[in-house]
Amino acid sequence: MGRITFLSILGIFIFTANAMAQSVPTAPDPIQNLAAEGAQLRYLGNEHGLDAWIAVKNGQEQYFYVQPSGEAFVMGILFDKSGDLVTVDQVQRLQAQGDESLEELTGSFPEAPAQSMEFQSPSAQMFADIEGANWVALGGNDAPVIYSFIDPQCPHCHDFIEDIRGEIESGAVQLRMIPVGLRPETKAQAAFLMAAPNAQERWFKHMDGDESALPVKDTISQQGAERNMAIMQSWKFNVTPMIIYRAQDGTVKIVRGRPADSAAILADLAG
């Protein structure tokens, strides 16, 4: 579900994909710098002349392939000439050596190595990440969908949702809010909202000024809100609201901040 993130897990652990049979090269400085930000690094071995590294944070992963010269590297997953996912095999080999922290990582890949796998465009990859975020649905279940990253205390978020509140409450559109917290207290509110069984009711009470609707509780896990923030940061989204939807022509569209014309977005939604 989730994609690339830079959140903290203490320590640096380097393993080889081929155990004792292969020495571990030195990773380029930008990859090593991830460790200073809290990442765990794993060396996945050398395939097709490329040294492979995985950086793991909070159960999320990022893959790097370093050119033989060591002067450049690329980020992503590796396919061979037949379209098979080399990266999956590399991770599975490392898992087989008993690296428990990697047990769940291949959940983001196809269940089996892909044969002639189709490449997704960046917009399709981004939209898939958004769909897999921890969202809260407001509105009708069968209505056209808008996704939006929302901070509970963001006034522009409140304004945007107020702009389309009538359509949400009538069931004409479904807003899938992806709660994040730009401050500790709003992250706690975002976590509470995702855990609430009556999220729509509480959200609108919160918008209407009820300060008790979204309490700040340290006892509620904030991992869901942190993962949402990780997705947001991985796509370089830096404001709320950040609105994403699929238009009638199938294209993925992004609106940064409160839309100037929410009615135009509603008219442009895929049915």
Image (spheres, helix red, strand yellow):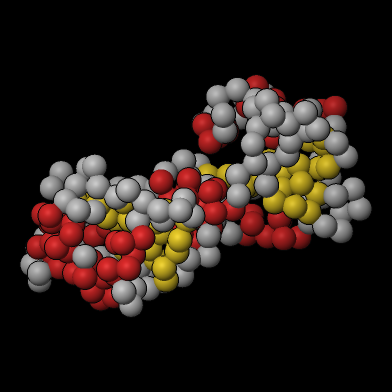
- Is there any visible trace of residue 52 in the rendered image? yes
Q: Judge by depth and name the residue closer to the eye, 207 or 53.
A: 207
Q: Which residue is drawn at 64% across and 36% down?
A: 118
| 50 lies above or below 70 | above
Is residue 41 among what the camera can see?
no
Q: Quadrant of residue 94?
A: top right
Which residue is depicted at the point 75% across and 52% down? 74
Position of 130 with respect to 215 (left or right) is right
Query: Residue 211, located in which quarter of the rendered image?
Result: bottom left
Q: Tell me where residue 238 appears, x and y as whole percent.
A: 46, 70
The relative height of residue 237 versus residue 4 in the rendered view (above or below) is below
Which of the pair 147/101 is nearer the observer? 147
Residue under the image location 32 percent in, 68 percent down: 264
Q: How many callouts does the rendering have? A: 0
Could you tell me residue 153's position as x and y percent? 25, 70
Instruction: Determine whether, in the image, residue 160 is placed left or right of residue 38.
Output: left
Q: In this view, does 111 lie above or below 58?
A: above
Residue sitting at the far right? 69
Residue 190: percent from left, percent from top: 27, 57
Residue at point 10%, 69% (across, down): 208
Describe residue 158's horizontal placement relative to residue 83 as left or right: left
Q: Is residue 56 left or right of residue 50?
A: left
Return the x and y of residue 100 as percentages of the image width and height.
Answer: 56, 29
Q: Front-most of 229 and 270?
A: 270
